[in-house]
Amino acid sequence: MSHPVIQTKQTRRKFDKAFKCRAVELWLSSGKAATEVATELGIHAQRLSAWRKRFAPPPPGGEGGGGAKRSAEQLEIENTGLRREVDYLRQQRDILKKTLGILSEPPSSAFNGSTR
């Protein structure tokens, strides 16, 4: 009697270039280990290291003579990520404002606003 083989299909996650660049930038600027940053992002450290090879900015004094200069594409990617973050933070702020407003309202009567 043979046992049936149960196969589970795992969906492969795909990350866009903006996410990869931002992940590498986060890792390099955080001073943390690749494994720690990768865990925070929910990816494998090997993947983060591979992205670094492809998307890390050139070291200062490398090609182009100035490491501080970034391409228009890199700036656009960073700008898009920052806009996304600003939108998220605005939503969080609005939620907190509404919550504070609800908690600051005077309580209604015990009988749902009805008078005797």
Image: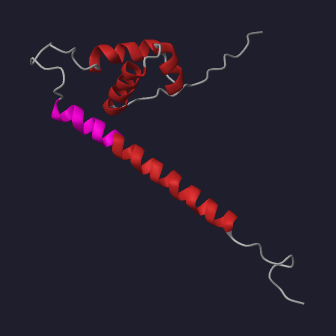
Q: How many marks?
A: 0
Image position of 78 with respect to 104: above or below: above
Image position of 17 with respect to 98: above or below: above
Quadrant position of the N terminus in the picture: top right
In the rendered image, residue 49, in percent from the top left (x then y), is placed at 38, 13
The residue furthest top is 1
Image position of 69 with respect to 82: above or below: above
In the rendered image, residue 84, in percent from the top left (x then y), is placed at 38, 45
Q: Residue at x 41, y 17 (%)?
A: 48
Q: Is residue 93 magenta?
A: no
The colour scheme is secondary structure
Q: Residue at x 77, y 72 (%)?
A: 107
In the rendered image, residue 104, in percent from the top left (x then y), is placed at 67, 66
Please identify the dominant SS of the magenta region. Answer: helix
**Left or right of residue 85: residue 92:** right
The residue furthest left is 64
**Left or right of residue 14: residue 68:** left
Q: Residue at x 20, y 34 (%)?
A: 73
Closer to the camera, 92 or 1?
92
Q: Residue at x 52, y 51 (%)?
A: 92
Q: Which residues are magenta?
A: 71-81
In the rendered image, residue 52, in percent from the top left (x then y), is placed at 33, 16
The residue furthest right is 116
Q: Is residue 76 magenta?
A: yes
Q: Quadrant of residue 22?
A: top left
Quadrant position of the C terminus in the picture: bottom right
Q: Quadrant of residue 97?
A: bottom right
